[in-house]
Image (spheres, helix red, strand yellow):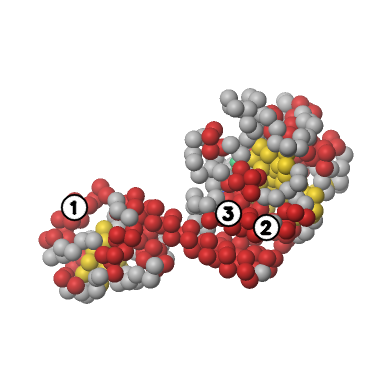
Amino acid sequence: MYSKVELYNEPEKKMEQMVELHYSEMTSFQHSFLCGLIKEKKPRKIVEIGVSAGGTTALILQCLKMLNVEAEMYSVDLMKRWYQNEKYETGFAAKKMIKDLKDKIYHSLLVGNSIPFFLEKIGNNIDFLILDTTHTLPGEYLDFIVSLPFLKEGCVVVMHDTIENHLVCRDTEVATKLLFDVVRADEKYYMWEEKINLSGLPNIAAFKVGKETKENVRDIFSAMTISWGYLLKDREKEKYRELIQKNYGDEYTLLFDRIEILQRNTYLQKQILEHYGKQADYLKMKWKREKIIILYGAGCYSDLYYQWATLNNLRVDALVISDGQEKVSEYDIKVPIYFLSDLPYKQEECAIVLAISKQYYQLVLQNLKKAGFDNIL
Ligand SMILES: C[S@@+](CC[C@H](N)C(=O)[O-])C[C@H]1O[C@@H](n2cnc3c(N)ncnc32)[C@H](O)[C@@H]1O
């Protein structure tokens, strides 16, 4: 059913006394699985997405050294500073190993952006890819989609945290397992990892990119409708989109655009349900009946309602804040901010959405009532 690889634990053994190894976020089995694949494949161009401290980066470099292969390796991470402790740079644990590399191995640490910003610089013919970032959609799943055109046929793709949703009991952490299951690949590597949990199902898996993988990319795109756990920032979305446009063409770009809008709306609606306490559609119905809509507050909740309203072509006329508060918003909201006493509308014309933390509701409602505003959506 699944392919197996001969585990290779020599690199880990060699590093046992080295502090670098302790920063790796993989288990001993996962090290042997990863190194086993490297030993079998002898890759020439490795890309690792998700570096953290760099413990696994160091292990891979050690493995390449022991195999005496010529290779280039690119380690990519969104964060310049270590996500677990900002005092350290991302990849700090691999720095010494990188400095001591001899001519045969080239290494480049690319931090501060996600993979689409680096792919063209890294170039084609990637023959080993390791995905280990957020585990939450779009995460590694979308990273694979944009990376696929840069992968050589036969490229081994290793995905970490394939049962992370069970290990940490967070339902959204399914990106790598979804990819593993949806991707078409004749060779999929899946081996029991006895010590990780009761089931022995592994928290790491891999597959080999074949002709069939590229031919069946349609289904990989399609499964991106499964709910996302976070939204892409505008600049990032544009970059992913640019690569999809260049490498997959118009039809796939349109599909991506439509999926992204669906996800954006759902994500915002979920947050509205949580904050407002009722379905966003109910709010929409009430919103549409009003002449003037004012968001009370200038923080993250007004950003939430503003984004959702903009996406759904609903009007927002202004933000309002209590007199004496600072009249700025750190969000990109393109309507004026007024103090309550300066609102240039008649009280009876305004419908107010309380875009503030629930703990302030009573106080704000009192203020609004005193100022003659009683239409609260
Ligand atoms: C689980 S850690 C990686 C662990 C590392 N592979 C290891 O085995 O030690 C996840 C890393 O992914 C990075 N990350 C999160 N989202 C990312 C993204 N979209 N693109 C690139 N890196 C990302 C985080 O900053 C973090 O360093």
Report the side of 84 relative to 187 (left or right).
Answer: left
Q: Position of residue 314 (x, y in %)?
A: 34, 70
Tag of residue 217: 2
Q: Position of residue 260 (x, y in %)?
A: 52, 61
In the rendered image, residue 218, in percent from the top left (x then y), is placed at: 65, 59
Residue at image coords 44%, 55%: 267
Note whether 157 is above or below 167 in the view shown: below
Amino acid type shown at disc 3: Ala
**Relative to 166, does residue 115 appear above or below in the rendering?**
below
Is residue 127 at least partly visible in the picture?
A: no
Q: Amino acid at mark 1?
A: Leu
Q: Secondary structure at mark 2?
A: helix
The reply to whether the C-beta atoms of the residues labelled 2 and 1 are less than 8 Å apart is no
Determine whether label 1 and label 3 are within 8 Å by CB: no
Q: Residues within 10 Å of mark 3 (few under 14, many from 20)?
A: some
Gap in Å between the C-alphas at discs 2 and 1?
A: 54 Å
Which residue is the site of mark 3?
A: 223
Mark 3 or mark 1, which is nearer the start of the sequence? 3
